[in-house]
Structure formats: C-alpha cells, structure tokens
C-alpha cells in the first residue's frame, strides 16, 4: 500500500483546501494510505541557524514523513498574491534535507484566483527537485461542496487527469 503525506496550505479549520485533499483521497481509492500534516502552525519559523543536524524535533518529523511517503499532496490557497507564509515556511525547512528530491508531488492551488501562488509553488517544488503534477482551481469554493464532493464536472475531469499523472510518478519511483 502506497503512503501519501498531505499538507494543507491553510491554517483555517474549515478549509476549502482540506476539502480538496479529502476529495483527492476519495478519488485515489483504497490502494493508498493518507497521512495529514497536523498543522502548519506547529512548525517553527525557519531559521538557518537551527537548520543543523539537531534541528527542532517537529521539523525532523516533518522531513521524515516526507521522505517516507511515496508521494505528497499539497493543496493551498493564495494569500496576498502568493503562497501562504506558513506553507512557504514548511517548504523552506525541507530545502537542506532534500526531502522532496525526486518525490512525486500533487500540487493544487484552490483559491479565488490563484495564478501567483500556482506559479510560485511550481517554481519552489522544481528548485527542490520534486516531480510535480500541478493544477490551478480558481473560484475553488464554488466547485466543491461541504462533503468534499467536486461538483464542477470540468474541474473533476482535470483533477482526475492530474491525479493520474501523480500516480504515474509514484508508480515509476
């Protein structure tokens, strides 16, 4: 059974992005086990002086979960024309560890607009050598219901294709 580590880029409890992670999990089926990062808020601010062999334990755990996963799902909104700072912080902590190197990543930007965050996450994941399958879902709240069912047929079809690319990267690891 393949393990997938999921990171929600929003700290909001009732997050549209968490709904998309749930929807993706349902679309993947039972061949995959999903482990969610408990909260972005638990990760301390990135500090290069602490990025040593003895980094904070929560950061070491984050890096280990990414390394042990067969793939990673990141679903994030766009804040102020970019990635949320808390998600960027998590990604910054992984740079020196190469946790994402050659790791299949499904990167989803589900937001009102999202173009700037979409380009940013692709750029960051490319620099840290992830195998990226990405999708932008503008007006995301209108395309999913409270039960994590994607109600927009075009979005659902595109997401199934993105998931297929992501699964292909995991199978070719």
Image (spheres, rainbow, N blue to C red):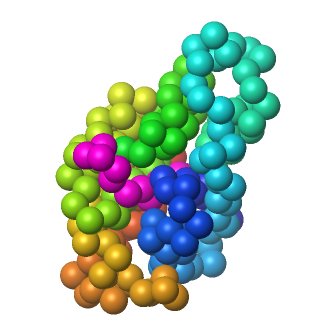
Kindly indicate the quadrant of the structure image that contains residue 135. bottom left
Indicate the position of residue 143 as horizontal and vertical percent values: 31, 81
Q: Residue furthest top?
A: 49
Camera-side residue of 88 and 24: 88
Q: Residue at x 36, y 34 (%)?
A: 124
23 magenta-colored: no
Q: Residue furthest front?
A: 80
Indicate the position of residue 71 as horizontal and vertical percent values: 54, 52
Indicate the position of residue 113 as horizontal and vertical percent values: 22, 61
In the drawing, does residue 29 fall left or right of residue 120? right
Camera-side residue of 6 and 16: 16
Kindly indicate the quadrant of the structure image that contains residue 62. top right
Residue 10 in the image: above or below residue 25: above
Indicate the position of residue 93 as horizontal and vertical percent values: 57, 28
Kindly indicate the quadrant of the structure image that contains residue 76. bottom left
Please state, as top left, top right, bottom left or bottom right, where the N terminus lies in the image: bottom right
Camera-side residue of 61 and 141: 141
Q: Residue at x 50, y 29 (%)?
A: 92
Please report the bounds of the magenta region as a residue range.
Answer: 70-82
Q: Is residue 62 visible?
A: yes
73 magenta-colored: yes
Q: Residue at x 29, y 35 (%)?
A: 123
């Amino acid at each position: 059974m393949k393990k997938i580590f999921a990171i929600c880029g929003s700290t909001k409890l009732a997050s549209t992005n968490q709904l998309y992670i749930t929807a993706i999990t349902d679309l993947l089926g039972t061949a995959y086990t999903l482990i969610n990062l408990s909260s972005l808020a638990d990760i301390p601010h990135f500090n290069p002086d602490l990025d040593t062999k003895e980094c904070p334990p929560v950061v070491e755990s984050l890096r280990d979960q990414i390394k042990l996963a067969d793939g990673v799902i990141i679903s994030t909104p766009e804040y102020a024309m970019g990635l949320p700072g808390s998600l960027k912080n998590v990604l910054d902590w992984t740079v020196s560890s190469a946790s994402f190197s050659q790791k299949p990543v499904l990167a989803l930007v589900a937001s009102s607009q999202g173009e700037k965050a979409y380009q940013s996450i692709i750029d960051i994941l490319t620099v840290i050598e992830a195998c990226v399958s990405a999708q932008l879902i503008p007006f995301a709240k209108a395309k999913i219901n409270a039960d994590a069912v994607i109600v927009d047929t075009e979005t659902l079809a595109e997401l199934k294709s993105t998931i297929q690319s992501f699964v292909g990267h995991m199978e070719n690891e």
